[in-house]
Image (cartoon, rainbow, N blue to C red):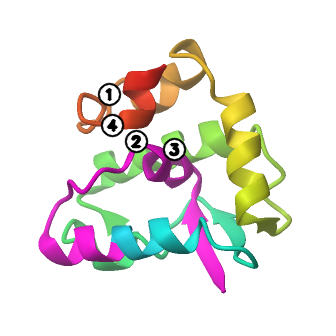
């Protein structure tokens, strides 16, 4: 299986516990979260709408909510992607192990997670 994931969604998936914008979004996020834990899953990285965004009610004309919000989301993606090689595909299990080593403190995710509306519910952020 192959997944297309935004940079910041790598962190979101680590903290996901069933909350979301809609039932369709939660169902899709749950499926993607299960898929990323399976052997033989490959991940391509992006800073544009991905396999999670496709079920988000905030996605309109390939941007998140509005131009200002979309800029903030792309910034979050780019903060993650600048620590990875976005030109290559990754084995999902290996990529998430790498993520654990890179993003291991609140300081390491300050530019990504601090203003996120989900950080109070996010298990990944809370464990930092």
Q: Which mark is residue 122?
A: 4
Distance from the alpha carbon under mark 2 to that under mark 3: 16 Å
Q: Is residue 23 left or right of residue 11?
A: left
Between circles 2 and 3, the one closer to the viewer is 3
Kindly report the distance in space between the C-alpha atoms of the residues bearing marks 3 and 4.
Answer: 9 Å
Kindly identify which residue carries mark 2: 72
Q: Give the alpha-carbon distance from disc 1 to disc 2, as whole Å.
A: 9 Å
- Which portion, as a residue range, is magenta? 1-28
Which residue is depicted at the point 80% across and 65% down? 90
Label 2 SS: helix
Q: CA distance from mark 3 to mark 1?
A: 14 Å
Q: Position of residue 2 (x, y in %)?
A: 67, 82
Mark 1 or mark 4: whose residue is earlier in sequence: 1
Residue 8 covered by magenta stretch: yes
Determine the secondary structure under disc 1: loop
Mark 2 / mark 4, whichever is N-terminal: 2
Q: Nearer the viewer, mark 3 or mark 1?
A: 3
Q: Is residue 69 left or right of residue 99?
A: left
- Quadrant containing the N terminus is bottom right
Q: Earlier in the sequence, mark 3 or mark 1?
A: 3
Query: Is the residue under label 4 in contact with that under label 1 (CB below 8 Å)?
Result: no
Which residue does the numbered mark 3 point to in the structure image?
Answer: 11
First in sequence: mark 2 or mark 3? 3
Which of the two marks, 1 or 2, is nearer to us in this view? Answer: 1
């Amino acid at each position: 299986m192959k997944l297309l994931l935004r940079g910041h969604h790598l962190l979101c998936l680590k903290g996901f516990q069933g909350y979301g914008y809609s039932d369709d979004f939660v169902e899709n996020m749950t499926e993607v979260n299960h898929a990323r834990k399976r052997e033989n899953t490959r991940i391509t990285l992006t800073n544009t709408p991905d396999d999670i965004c496709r079920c988000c009610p905030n996605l309109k004309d390939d941007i998140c909510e509005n131009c200002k919000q979309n800029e903030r989301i792309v910034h979050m993606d780019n903060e993650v992607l600048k620590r990875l090689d976005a030109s290559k595909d990754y084995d999902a299990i290996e990529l998430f192990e790498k993520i654990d080593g890179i993003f291991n403190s609140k300081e390491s995710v300050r530019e990504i997670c601090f203003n996120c509306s989900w950080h109070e519910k996010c298990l990944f952020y809370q464990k930092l």
